[in-house]
Image (cartoon, rainbow, N blue to C red):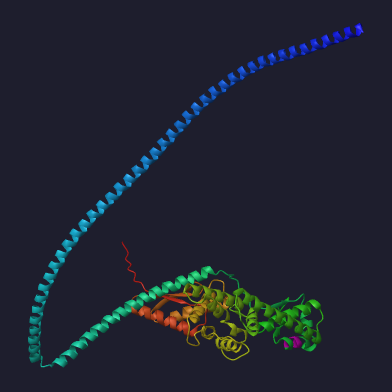
């Protein structure tokens, strides 16, 4: 029991000591915490004071910077304002100067107007006085004229009406003379300008249209491999050659010329059919009338197709529309027609383009001129089958197949002056036709015909009285005539040139034109000894 009590007491004392220790520990902890808190608070206060101090410094610096920036902006605004004020002042001064200048100008004009008004008033007064003097002089002149007329009537014995008639007759004669001089001057000036303009237009048209200068040959021959082939072409008793001539409508000339036979025909289409048929027959080797007829028929069909294609190609080249198929075919036939060696279809295309260029330069319808130029020689595709010249044949043919334009029809029928020109397009086509025919290389003649033409030119020139020498130059496009200066004067020289040109036009056939130049000169020769 005692032990139990002792143990209890001991346990109670232990509990009390533990409690007291815990309280002491708590007190010590609280004191430690307070000490730590006091130090942390002091540190925080110190840091807060430092932050506040730095903040004040930054605020002061920012305030100073903001103040400086505000001052700078205020200064810039002040400068801009000063500049605007200075500019406004300058404009105001300039405006004042202009107003002052205008006022000065107005003052001068006012002064000038006042002076002019004074001058006008003075001139009006002078004019009034002058009119009065003129009126007085007119009265005196009328009286003087009346007196002179009466005196003249008494002296001449003529009445007033008779004198007027004589005076009017003299005035009319003088006026006619003056009018004739004016008309002559105007005509010469107009002709000179027209010639210059025509040359300019023609040269530009030629330069703007460049085409080939080659011509097709009009001689058609067929090469044969050997002279034995000539016998086969002729056939037994001439039946093969007669069959060829009958089927094609040509003449076959078989002579002693080695290696060739000649095909002659005025129709170039039939001539082409014959030549190609012969070439096929020679290459094939079979030569009898039936085979000849088959080959000729086939060749004629092929050439017909080529004719249509050539016509269509030409129409497409010149860019024309609305042509009847018969007209297109007729133009295609011109591919096998030549004039002095010049292919007529190519000539027609060339004339079409030249006509368009000339018409455009004159301010006319170039498309219509191109149509006129292209169809102008269409009559040549059928003139060997019909009576009459190719201009009329072509005009009738074009009218028959739907060509309604008067300009086109007149250009076809009148491009050789067979009918009067009714539109501007006919002389344009005539000029383009002459340019195309006369340009270098367009046409070709045989040497014999060329020499003959030169000789004819010289003979015509030498036939005129007073001519000493005559030379055909520039390929027969000019004849130069030397006359005797002692027998022929200047006026007679012009007459000789006119007579030669007239005889050449009447007696010769030639492309283009021929110039006649008559030269008359006097030479004084003395020998120094």
Observer-nearest residue: 29 or 441? 29
Residue at coordinates 75% horizontally, 84% vertically from top-left? 296
Q: Nearest the camera: 272 or 24? A: 24
Judge by depth and name the residue closer to the eye, 3 or 413.
Answer: 3
The image shows residue 134, relative to residue 157, as above or below, that is above
- Of residue 526 and residue 85, the one placed in the foreground of this image is 85
The answer to whether one can see residue 7 in this image is: yes
Would residue 121 appear left or right of 483 to someone viewing this image? left
Q: Residue 136: where, in percent of width, then height?
A: 8, 78
Judge left or right: residue 115 versus residue 4: left
The residue drawn where x is 38% and y is 38% is 78
Q: In the rendered image, which quarter is residue 300 located in?
A: bottom right
In the rendered image, the quadrant that contains the N terminus is top right
Residue extending furthest right? 1
Highlighted magenta segment, given as a residue range: 241-245
Answer whether residue 216 is visible to the viewer in this image: no
């Amino acid at each position: 029991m005692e032990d139990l009590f002792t143990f209890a007491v001991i346990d109670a004392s232990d509990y009390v000591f533990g409690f007291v220790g815990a309280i002491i520990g708590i007190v010590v902890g609280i004191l430690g915490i307070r000490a730590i808190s006091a130090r942390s608070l002091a540190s925080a206060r110190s840091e807060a004071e430092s932050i506040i101090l730095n903040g004040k410094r930054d605020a002061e610096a920012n305030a100073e910077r903001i103040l400086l920036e505000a001052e700078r902006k205020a200064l810039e605004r002040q400068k801009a304002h000063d500049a605007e004020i200075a500019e406004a002042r300058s404009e105001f001064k300039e405006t004042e100067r202009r107003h002052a200048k205008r006022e000065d100008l107005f003052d001068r004009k006012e002064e000038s107007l006042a002076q002019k008004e004074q001058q006008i008033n003075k001139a009006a007064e002078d004019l009034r006085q002058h009119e009065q003097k003129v009126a007085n002089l007119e009265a005196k002149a009328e009286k003087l004229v009346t007196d002179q007329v009466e005196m003249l009537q008494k002296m001449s014995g003529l009445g007033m009406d008779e004198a007027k008639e004589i005076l009017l007759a003299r005035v009319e004669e003088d006026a006619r003379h003056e009018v004739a001089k004016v008309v002559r001057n105007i005509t010469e000036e107009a002709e000179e300008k027209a010639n210059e303009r025509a040359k300019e237009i023609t040269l530009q048209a030629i330069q703007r249209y460049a085409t080939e200068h080659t011509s097709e040959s009009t001689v058609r021959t067929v090469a044969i491999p050997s002279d034995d082939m000539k016998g086969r072409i002729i056939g037994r008793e001439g039946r093969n050659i007669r069959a060829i001539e009958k089927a094609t409508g040509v003449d076959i000339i078989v002579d002693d010329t080695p290696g060739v036979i000649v095909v002659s025909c005025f129709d170039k289409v039939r001539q082409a059919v014959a030549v190609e048929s012969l070439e096929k027959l020679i290459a094939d080797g079979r030569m009898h009338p039936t085979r000849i007829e088959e080959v000729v028929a086939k060749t004629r069909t092929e050439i017909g197709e080529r004719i249509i294609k050539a016509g269509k190609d030409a129409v497409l080249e010149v860019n024309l529309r609305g042509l009847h198929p018969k007209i297109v075919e007729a133009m295609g036939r011109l591919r096998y027609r030549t004039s002095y060696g010049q292919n007529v279809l190519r000539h027609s295309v060339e004339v079409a383009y030249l006509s368009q260029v000339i018409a455009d330069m004159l301010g006319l319808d170039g498309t219509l001129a191109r149509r006129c130029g292209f169809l102008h020689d269409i009559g040549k595709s059928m003139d060997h089958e019909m009576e009459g010249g190719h201009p009329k044949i072509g005009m009738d043919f074009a009218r028959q197949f739907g060509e309604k334009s008067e300009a086109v029809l007149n250009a076809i029928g009148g491009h050789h002056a067979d009918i009067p020109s009714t539109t501007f397009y006919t002389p344009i086509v005539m000029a383009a036709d002459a340019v195309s025919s006369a340009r270098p290389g367009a046409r070709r003649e045989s040497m014999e015909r060329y020499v003959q033409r030169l000789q004819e030119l010289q003979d015509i020139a030498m036939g005129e009285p007073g001519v000493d020498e005559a030379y055909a130059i520039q390929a027969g496009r000019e004849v130069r005539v030397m006359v005797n200066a002692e027998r022929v004067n200047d006026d007679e020289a012009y007459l000789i040139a006119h007579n030669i040109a007239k005889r050449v036009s009447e007696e010769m056939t030639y492309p283009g034109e021929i110039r006649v130049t008559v030269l008359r000169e006097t030479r004084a020769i003395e020998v120094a000894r």
